[in-house]
Amino acid sequence: MKIYSTRRRPNRPARIVIDGLGKRFPGAPGFAVDGVGLDIAAGEFVCVVGASGCGKSTLLRILAGFETTTTGTVSVGDEPISGPGPERGVVFQDYGLFPWLTVAENIGYGPKQARMTRPDIAEITDRWLDTVGLTRVRQSFPHQLSGGMQQRVAIARVLANSPAVLLMDEPFGALDALTRTDMQAELKRIHRETAVTVVFVTHGIDEAVYLADRVVVMAGGAAHGNPGHVRDIVEIDLPGERDSTTPEFNAYKRRIDALVHQGNHAAV
């Protein structure tokens, strides 16, 4: 892989601290989530799993600054979250690419908005095109790409802004099984190279065990009559190159599956 000597400030992964987080939406009879506490180390990869409606996406939207807290505090790099910020990049399931821009223009959009010089924008764009393996389609438009390629562009576009934290809300949920597997491996590689802090929401327990340093299992929610909350946190003590067929991998899968389904019969 080509080495780029970008002049941008090096990416510095940030710690995330959540203390007593509660969220009540206007008009709702109770809290959507309540009493959530997490301490995520800088550079850590954390997956959040749980039954539908337990507050996974609400938690992520609060971390992104799209929603405010009702109670408690949330900070990134010792700074309280007061709204969206460039230190936090967000990747959704629907890609969110600009259809009128090429692949290269989508990736370079953030640095351009930051009024960086043209040489720096070109250097950053080339770096991330190379990192996600899309240099040959740099002049293509999003509609000309497969779903997996579009999601690679979405991830590269966020990382081109050198975020301290990468927030991902079921980013591979719309992909076919083979492409999803490829993207999981790609994301692990990118995480090793960037060391960015990642919070990854998923319904897939296999996906969580494959990707995460720790898996946060959430429970509750309006459908279960109590606010969403953290039921347990499972540390995944497996090597970096994980094999889903091993007994150790499947032991973690069974443990997390039991935690997700404890006390209810909702599907993961």
Image (cartoon, rainbow, N blue to C red):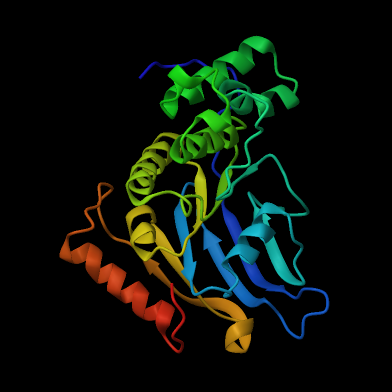
Total numbered labels placed on residues in the image: 0
Q: Nearer the viewer, residue 212 or 77?
A: 212
Instruction: Name the spot of residue 159 as percent of width and height, x first.
Output: 55, 34
Q: In this view, does 152 lie above or below 266?
A: above
> In the picture, residue 23 is in which quadrant?
bottom right
Q: Is residue 122 above or below residue 66?
A: above
Quadrant in the picture for residue 70: bottom right
Q: Is residue 161 left or right of residue 50?
A: right
Q: Position of residue 214 (x, y in %)?
A: 41, 61
Q: Residue furthest top?
A: 119
Measuring 32% from the left and 46% from the top, which residue is drawn there?
178
The quarter of the rendered structure image containing the N terminus is top left
Asked whether residue 249 appears in the rendered view, the answer is yes
Q: Can residue 42 be seen in this view?
A: no
Q: Eyeballing the image, is 116 above or below 196? A: above
Question: Is 262 located above or below residue 249 in the figure?
Answer: below
The residue located at (56%, 32%) in the rendering is 143
* Left or right: 38 as drawn, with respect to 211: right
Residue 108 screen position, x and y as percent: 63, 23
